Structure formats: structure tokens, C-alpha cells
Image (cartoon, grey):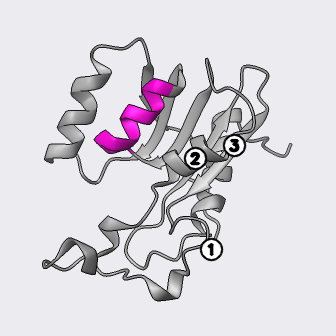
Amino acid sequence: MKRIITWDEYFMGIAKLSAKRSKDPNTQVGCCIVNEDKRIVAVGYNGMPRGCDDNKFPWNIKDGKLQDTKYAYVVHAELNAILNATTPLKDCILYVTLFPCNECMKAIIQAGIKELVFEDNKYEGVDFDLAAKKMLQFTNIKVRQFKGEKIELD
């Protein structure tokens, strides 16, 4: 009998597929937000703001002036999904391929997301990760790491 993927695998698969839209040569991140009826209400990936040509802004991560790196310009996947939503996100579940930074965590909390499912946390223990987790301690957001089968899209 053919195995049917779980809802978590399905929605994390959508997040991973969304990440493939990112032109970031270092880290592609995708996000999928789902309502209580298991309907996708928003997706996003890390990229330049609407109207900003990806080819005219830096993608490098080297030290130097902030305006010479991607960090001054890139909109993270979670924020992109929140901004792309066409419906209120209260009580939704957010699936993301990389644990959110503190800036995205602010938006997640403010949007009323009730659950956060992440696949990887390669920045665990760095300052922005610790700040994000500190904020989470004061919320009722359920957080869990994705434990389903890894969905490979290559």
C-alpha cells in the first residue's frame, strides 16, 4: 500500500518548495501558514522586497558596511508570508524551514500565530535565536521541531 504523507509533511513540503523561489545563494528559507481547517492562507520565502530587483542588491554576507550585505534588504520568509496573507492569521500554524530570528518572531507573535513548526535551527544559541526564544517564553505559542520524513525536492 502506498504511504500517504502526513499533514506536517505536506505543509513542510510546501514551505520547502517555497524556499526554492529564493535567490539567496547561502540560505533559502520557506514558510507556509495554515488555518485551523488545514487550508493554506499564506506562503513566503526570503527575498528582496517587491519592486526591488534581485540583481541590483547585494547577496553577500561579508563583513563591512550593512548596506553592502543582504541583511539590510532581505525580507525573511516568515515576514513575507505574514505580509502576503489575505486573511487574519490568528490561531494559524506556521511551518518554516529555519527557526525564526527575533525580528520574525515579533511578527509571528503579533499576528496571533498559535503554533510554530520548524525544520532546522542552524543558528541555535546565537544572539537573535536566544532573543526569539526569550520572547516565546512569554507567549502561548506551541513550538515543535518537524519530525516527519524529510521531503526532498531536488
| Figure check: 85 above or below 76 | above
Mark identifier at residue 149: 2
Q: Nearer the viewer, mark 3 or mark 1?
A: 3
Mark identifier at residue 154: 1
Read off the residue under disc 3: 42
Does label 3 or label 2 sit earlier along the sequence?
3
Residue 29: image location, x then y, percent: 48, 59
Identified at 29% across, 40% down, the residue is 102
How far, Cα to Cα, is label 2 from label 1?
15 Å
Q: Nearer the viewer, mark 2 or mark 1?
A: 1
How far, Cα to Cα, is label 3 from label 1?
23 Å
Q: Is residue 120 magenta?
A: no
Q: Tally the numbered discs.
A: 3
Left-right relation of 86 to 75: right
Nearest the viewer among 60 and 144 is: 60
Quarter of the figure with residue 144: top left
Q: Quarter of the image for the N terminus: give it.
A: top right
Residue furthest out toward the bottom: 55
Kindly identify the amino acid type of the residue bearing the numbered disc 1. Asp
How far, Cα to Cα, is label 3 from label 2?
23 Å
| Figure check: 16 above or below 53 | above
Nearest the viewer among 52 and 137 is: 52
Residue 88: image location, x then y, percent: 68, 26
Q: Within 10 Å of the Cα at label 1, are there few (<14), some (14-19), or many (20+) other Cα atoms?
A: few
Q: Quarter of the image for the C terminus: give it.
A: bottom right
Identified at 63% across, 36% down, the residue is 8
Kindly identify the amino acid type of the residue bearing the numbered disc 3. Ala
Identified at 60% across, 45% down, the residue is 83
Give the structural element (helix, strand or loop) at label 1.
loop
Left-right relation of 66 to 116: left
